[in-house]
Amino acid sequence: MPHLALYTFGVLKSPLADPAPLTREFHDSGEAVYQKISQHPGYLAHAKAADGARGTFFDLDWGAWGEFAVPPWYGKGRTVETIALATTLSLWTDLRPAFDAIYTGLHREALNRRYDWFERTGHPSYVFWWVSDGTIPTWQDGVSRLEHLHDHGPAPHAFTFHHSFDPDGTPTRIKGIQPKSDHVR
């Protein structure tokens, strides 16, 4: 049975190392949000550094998730002092469980604050695609799917909640979610 891959990417208004209250608030809430999402039905896994290593995204060993990559338009720092991004790569059983996890609870509360923390870039902030059972998506897969979505719009290769596809490429809808523009405002 295929699994759903999800890549998210956002550019923070200030570096993660910034001691300002908003940056700290975003950073400090991340652990609780991840913990809640990882307990949600339909969640399978997310990219974690091998052996729980700490450092910048760029210098960690991500194991089967591959070498860390970011979209080419990310122009902020890559050092501990300057890195200003938030990104995830995860696997789900289907669209509905992913939707329910993302748009409820702590994650929903964080989404409501996204414009306090993130820049508006003119690029999509997330992308879905289907992978075969046993396949671990890589960071580079996520970047290329996000770029495809930006350049060509939703398709079976790269899609959103509002314009989604079944594993066989047939357009589908999540009950209660209507199509809308996926363009960033």
Image: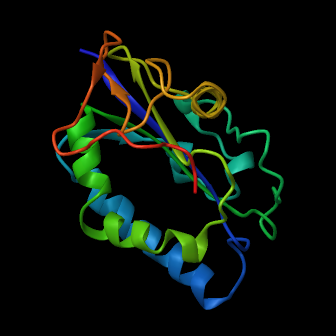
Q: Residue at x 66, y 66 (%)?
A: 12
Q: Residue at x 36, y 70 (%)?
A: 32
Q: Would residue 144 be found to the left or right of residue 102 on screen?
A: right
Q: Quadrant of the C terminus?
A: bottom right
Q: Position of residue 122 (x, y in %)?
A: 67, 50
Q: Position of residue 181 (x, y in %)?
A: 46, 43
Between 55 and 93, the one nearer to me in the picture: 93
Snapshot quadrant of residue 148: top right
The reply to whether residue 166 is visible in this rendering is no
Relative vertical location of residue 124 with respect to residue 15 in this rendering, above or below: above
Between 51 and 140, the one nearer to me in the picture: 140
Q: Residue at x 27, y 41 (%)?
A: 178
Snapshot quadrant of residue 65: top right
Between 153 and 142, the one nearer to me in the picture: 153
Between 98 and 181, the one nearer to me in the picture: 181
Q: Quadrant of the N terminus?
A: top left
Q: Position of residue 31 (x, y in %)?
A: 42, 67
Relative vertical location of residue 166 with respect to residue 161 in this rendering, above or below: above
The reply to whether residue 6 is visible in this rendering is yes
Q: Position of residue 13 (x, y in %)?
A: 70, 71
Number of disc labels: 0
Relative vertical location of residue 84 with respect to residue 5 in this rendering, above or below: below
